[in-house]
Amino acid sequence: MPSLTLAHDERLPGVTVITVSGELDATNRAQLDAYVKDLPAGRLVFDLSGVPFMDSSALHVLLMCDARCRREGGSVRLAAVQSLPARLFEITGVLAHVPVHGTVEDAVAAALGRAERSV
């Protein structure tokens, strides 16, 4: 299993893009949880283009992050989701609650209120 790598950068004022690479599962959910808790709640975009697999424990972390951001007036958006994580989002109903976009650029634009185009 490839190791998990996490990085972030601020794109335009107020939108932080978190780039995630590697499989997200119970073995590294604590790493993801600690990473996102260290970021200020706001408008977050998760670039999941490098995530071929995600289990429910990692999904739980993303949902808790979304809840924290919403409480503080922000939002979470997911971008560039591969097929297996997309299937997890579909069968769990996450798509009804967390916007998913085809590209990071679309997600950033939507977070800034410039577009609401989601996949």
Image (spheres, helix red, strand yellow):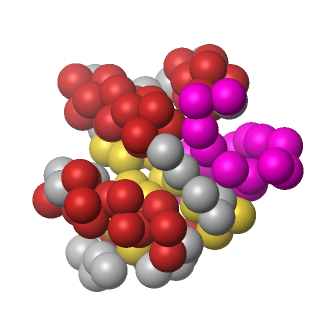
- Where does the image place residue 3, in percent across and percent down from the top left? 84, 43
Q: Is residue 108 left or right of residue 39?
A: left
Magenta-drawn stretch contains 6: yes
37 w.r.t. 24: above or below: above
Q: Quadrant of residue 60?
A: top left
Q: Residue at x 18, y 56 (%)?
A: 93
User: Which residue is most to the right?
Assistant: 2
Label count reads: 0
Q: Is residue 20 above or below residue 31?
A: below
Work out whether residue 47 can be spotted: no
Residue drawn 82% across the image and 49% down it: 1
Can you give x and y, in whole percent of width and height, for residue 92 in the image?
A: 23, 52
Work out whether residue 100 or residue 17 is closer to the camera in this orientation and state it.
100
The span picked out in magenta is 1-27
Q: Residue, x 32% and y 59% (percent of image)?
A: 89
- Residue 53 in sight in this render: yes
Is 95 situated left or right of 25 in this image? left
Q: Is residue 115 left or right of residue 21?
A: left
Please state the horizontal and vertical placement of residue 25, each as a whole percent of the image: 59, 38
Going by the image, does 58 lie left or right of 91?
right
| Residue 115, quarter of picture | bottom left
Considering depth in this image, is 64 or 41 the residue closer to the camera? Answer: 64
